[in-house]
Amino acid sequence: MTTKPIHLIGVPMDCGKRRRGCLMGPDAYRTAGLSESLIDLGHTVTDTGNVQPGAFAPEAKDTHLHALNETVAWTRALQKSAEAAMADGLPIFMGGDHALSAGTVSGVAAHAAREGRPQFMLWLDAHTDFHTPGSTDSGNLHGTPVAYISGQKGFDAFPPLPAAVPEENICLLGLRSVDRAERAAIEKTGIHAHDMREIDEHGIARPLAAFLDRVAAAKGMLHVSLDVDFLDPDVAPAVGTTVPGGATVREAHLVMEMLYDSGLMTSLDLVELNPFLDTRGRTAKLMVDLAASALGRNIFDRVTRSYS
Ligand code: MG
Ligand code: MG
């Protein structure tokens, strides 16, 4: 079990796409009892309040990118707060939309570089989020953080990366909405990408266990980024980008339980929760339960069997 104190960091970032609502995410996690659930498990938990972006210039009218300047300001602020939080704790970033990961992951990667340890990243998502500002048709920058974090070209407006996460240290799990161009782009990289068909055929434990073995062998630090749309919309409706055929409740808990057993997770994002679309808080509660599983909650104690 992690002995580091947990820092809950609110990130009411809502500019990574046009549909509003993720700014309410941090307070939905607070209302659903994230802090209390982790304290119950024996953790020391501090809610450090919400991060805010610094000042930013008015958005240009002639760009297809939505809220570029605001997103860049958030990225800069989050890089700083993520790097600082890593000094003495395990940060959980309560989003906010997925554009926030450009800041959180680059911040934790800067910390890992200073420690002389490799940074790894597990991306639990229906989408690859591997567009660049040049390739995105929608102009929604929540579809770009994996490209930024891994050091792809085209992010000149963003802060320079303190330390890119190497492609081969990135695992995308749960994919089911990837267009042909994105698939071709991912296949040219060293990124490990696992879609729902692979999970259906072989189970979710197999690709995850292989990835965790690599993290352990490299003595790496592991950032986990959990997008609500990793889950099936039947169980997690509170997200603006629902895609049918997602992870079940048990598949998601298994991922979290394996992460806890591995002892490898050093930081966590909870992203894309849009409480405006939720049904009586059920998605917020499920995300809180998943975070608790990643930090030590068991559904059942396992009885050790003897075969002798
Ligand atoms: Mg995403
Ligand atoms: Mg997604």
Image (spheres, rainbow, N blue to C red):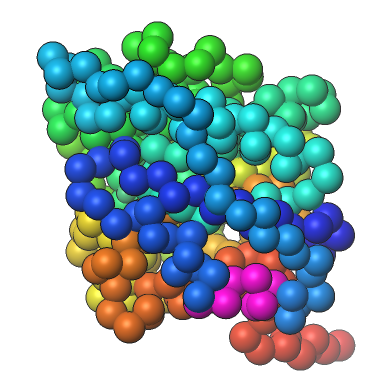
Placement of 159 over or under 34, stated as above or below: above
- Residue 97 belongs to magenta span: no
Is 168 left, or right, of 305 in this rendering?
A: left
Task: For residue 199, say whether it is visible.
Answer: no
Is 71 left, or right, of 42 in this rendering?
A: left
Q: Quadrant of residue 130?
A: top left
**Horizontal and vertical percent position of residue 24:** 39, 60
At x 65% / y 38%, what residue is drawn? Answer: 82
Q: Is most of the magenta stretch helix, strand or loop?
A: helix
Q: Quadrant of residue 214?
A: top right
At x 74% / y 75%, what residue is drawn? Answer: 39
At x 50% / y 29%, what residue is drawn? Answer: 54
Viewer-closest of 254 and 303: 254
Task: For residue 273, say whether it is visible.
Answer: yes
Viewer-closest of 32 and 250: 32
Placement of 262 over or under 66, stated as above or below: below
At x 29% / y 57%, what residue is drawn? Answer: 21
Per the rendered image, the range of residues in magenta is 32-38
**Horizontal and vertical percent position of residue 232:** 30, 68
